[in-house]
Image (cartoon, rainbow, N blue to C red):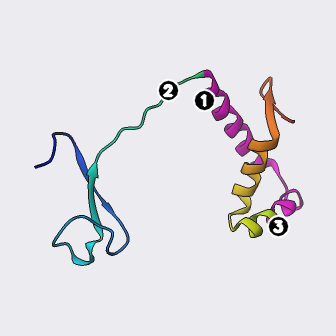
């Protein structure tokens, strides 16, 4: 017997599921969780930084994106993710403007 609450089925890799009788055990039954969304000043600042980083990405030319290709290949991530990672680590917002640390 399960405790009360909402449950969802989630697809998982073969053999990792917990629903008996489903071919290949590719389904998992888990509790439905609604994540918290606290609007703390630190979280709002981080979201603003992320929003500014994405806006900056859209203004870059192909030549501006080239340095991030090397990092992306080394870390096996996309060029966009390499740029965002670098920006979140090395930049901060001052009056809504991205400034290098």
User: In the drawing, what numbered circle is on residue 38?
Assistant: 2
> Which element is circle 2 on?
loop
Q: Nearer the viewer, residue 21 or 68?
A: 21
Which residue is outermost to the bottom? 24
Name the N-terminal-most of marks 3 and 2: 2
Q: Residue 19, image x and y in percent?
A: 21, 65
Residue at (86% x, 63% y) in the render: 66
How many residues crowd around disc 3 within 10 Å: few (fewer than 14), some, or many (20 or more)? few
The main secondary structure of the magenta stretch is helix
Q: Tell me the magenta residue range.
A: 41-69
Name the N-terminal-most of marks 3 and 1: 1
Residue 80 is covered by the magenta coloring:
no
Q: Is residue 76 visible?
A: yes
> Which element is circle 3 on?
helix
* Left or right: 13 as drawn, with respect to 43: left
User: In the drawing, what numbered circle is on residue 43?
Assistant: 1
């Amino acid at each position: 017997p399960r405790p009360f609450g909402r449950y969802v089925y989630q697809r998982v890799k073969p053999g990792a599921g917990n629903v008996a009788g489903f071919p290949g055990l590719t389904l998992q039954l888990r509790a439905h969780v609604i994540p918290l969304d606290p609007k703390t000043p630190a979280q709002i600042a981080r979201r603003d930084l992320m929003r500014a980083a994405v806006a900056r990405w859209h203004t870059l030319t192909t030549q501006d994106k080239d340095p991030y290709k090397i990092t992306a290949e080394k870390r096996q991530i996309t060029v966009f993710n390499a740029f965002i990672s670098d920006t979140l680590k090395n930049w901060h917002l001052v009056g809504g403007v991205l400034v290098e640390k």
